[in-house]
Image (cartoon, rainbow, N blue to C red):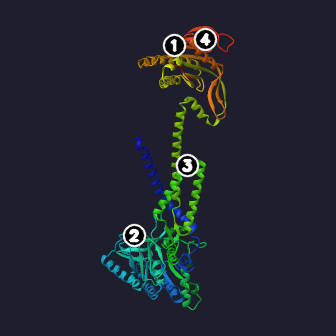
Amino acid sequence: MKKFKPLIIFISVVLFMFITYFIFNFFVEPKFYNVMMNMVVANKSGHDDIVVIVIDDKSISKQRWPWKRDMYAKMFNYLDKYTNAKIIGFDSILTSVDKDNIKADIELYNSVKSNDKLVVGFVPLRKSYNDAQQGENYDKAFDEKFGIKIKDERTNKYKSPYRSLSMFPKGYFDSAKKVGSVYVERDGDGYLRTIPQLIPYKGKLYPSLGLKMYAELNDITEFTLTNNYLTNDKTDLKIPLNQSPSIIFDYMHFYKTRPQSEYSHKTYSAIDIVDSWNNLQNGKSPIINPKEFDGKIVFVGANAKAAALGLEDALPTPIHPKHPGVDIQATNLDNLLHGEFIVPTPALQDLIIQIVLILATFLIVTYYSLFMSLGIIALIMIAYIAVCVTFFKFNMAINVVTPLALQLITMIFGYSYKFILESRNKDKIKDAMGRYISQDVMKNVVSNIDNLSLGGKRSNVTVLFADIRGFTSMSEKLTPEEISLILNEYFTEIEPIITKYNGVINKFIGDAVMAIFGEPIQDKNHALNAVLCGNAMLKKVKQLQEKWLYEGKPKIEIGVGINTGDAFVGNIGSEKRLEYTVIGDTVNLASRLESYNKIYKTNFLISSSTYNEVKGNVDVIKISEVQIRGKAKKMDIYEILRVSNNNEKSTNS
């Protein structure tokens, strides 16, 4: 399992990255697309050569809804007979006859029939016709009258989900000369960012309202459709397209809405056009001068906010939460006429950008310090945002937030990896250093890592010295390798004994060992624990003697000397090289006591100060009036004969 751990971690990281990509790409990125569209792309209003006539609240307030269809006829007649408008787009679907106002319907049909500039709207439907035969006949007649030539060179073609078309009343069908789809499709979050340019229906392709108007304006009779573009031979139109099972679409280049308006194009109230027609018919001055429409492209639609009337035709787009549908249709044609399209960067390019940012971030985190790496990554992020803004200014939509999110996730994983790696290295260093100095000293150093300095304190401690007897003569008989093996085994066996009794090995001195009790481990019973430790060390040596005798190795003996008293405990040395140790007369006396074992043929000697701490727990022989080198007065020392069984291990306070 351990050998698969890196693979498991790698798979987990990749899976987390994928989940992050999915969440940001599909739920967060569209919001930032809206922001970039609103702040960077939509920096100007729609072009002045396109205007909108809308049935708005003013129109409804002056002429109660529903309107008889002769009202539409008046608008179309006004535009046809009194203006030099280039073309007119009707963003509305007519599917029924007004049986109560047949005469008004006929007036509409007549106005549509006489208007060569009018393009009317239709939509595809997902439900089937109620009468299959009637539907089949309608589809045939529709294609014969309104179909356009499209040279389809796509390699992949989706099956259309549409089962019928919005069916015109016969009089309207017969009168209409040009049609275009006004169908729109929103993204998963409810926003409209694209426009269907071609509607696939029963093996045919039908144009959007804007595309049909563009074809009429430029006398285009055929388009060429490839996997990526829609073009024609007469103009330089090249629409970058995307495909879905239901539509062939492009991303819209939205324009800034006009002051105090949700429209990006200049608008006129429909009632003003109707009244202008009426005035002109009666020899009066029109409310709207017909010359305002000369040379203009006109869209007609409805968008009154009176919800009960069902006239509000508005959808959320990047530039407005309630963008009028008729202005969306106008924006589409505006894009076609002026070659302004938003082109998303290819998926492969986005993937390469994300991989480069991820790798760069990981390498920066790995090889630079925290503050340096944070600074570099912050600069990269700022630079990337600047690149995104530049791309959008040139109508290229690049993912903004998803790469940055993956970069942040990479930072988190990178720092986590670096932290784990450094922690492992620190543990290795601590383990290695613990082989040279005591683990307890190591812990003390680590806990005070920010306050390491020369100096220390005066403490009451017990110092133990243990030395191998006859080591010099033994060294003369054995090879250095054999001596090393014996010493290593000996020290390996006594180290845990010293640790067990709260002692700290201060240093190995050739064949001798010096241990401290009472510091840095706080222990009020340090004297007794030192004696218990010395006793256990002697027992362990007896066990080793039997083992070494069996192995043919020389017999060794040790001597132990222990003294208790005040000493300086802390760091000595220089500012660049410190050693944690204990110094003072207490240490010197412990060392001399150990050496007196040779003189008195003993193995275990303690000072009177140590004896005063442990008497009652040990059996001793007092060696009186010993002249200690360096001391003016003689003093008593004691040989430990045995230690009480109930004190095999003292308790630490």
Spatial CA span between label 3 and label 4: 62 Å
Say which of 246 and 268 sits in front: 246
> What residue appears at the point 56 percent right and 88 percent down from the top-left corner?
279
Spatial CA span between label 1 and label 2: 95 Å
Spatial CA span between label 2 and label 3: 50 Å
The image quadrant of residue 110 is bottom left
Return the residue at label 4. Answer: 637
Return the residue at label 1. Answer: 644
Q: Is residue 647 visible?
A: yes
Element assignment for label 2: loop
In the rendering, at what x and y percent does residue 229 appear? Answer: 44, 73
Quadrant of the snapshot with the N terminus = top left
Return the residue at label 3. Answer: 367
Element assignment for label 4: strand
Say which of 194 and 619 sits in front: 619
Mark closest to the chain's N terminus, 2 or 3: 2
> What residue appears at the point 57 percent right and 65 percent down from the top-left corner?
389
Say which of 281 and 389 sits in front: 389
Spatial CA span between label 3 and label 1: 60 Å
In the rendering, at what x and y percent does residue 459 appear? Answer: 65, 23
> What residue appears at the point 53 percent right and 25 percent down from the top-left corner?
499
Q: Residue furthest bottom?
A: 283
Mark closest to the chain's N terminus, 4 or 1: 4
Kind of residue sitting beneath label 1 = Ser
Say which of 617 and 303 sits in front: 617
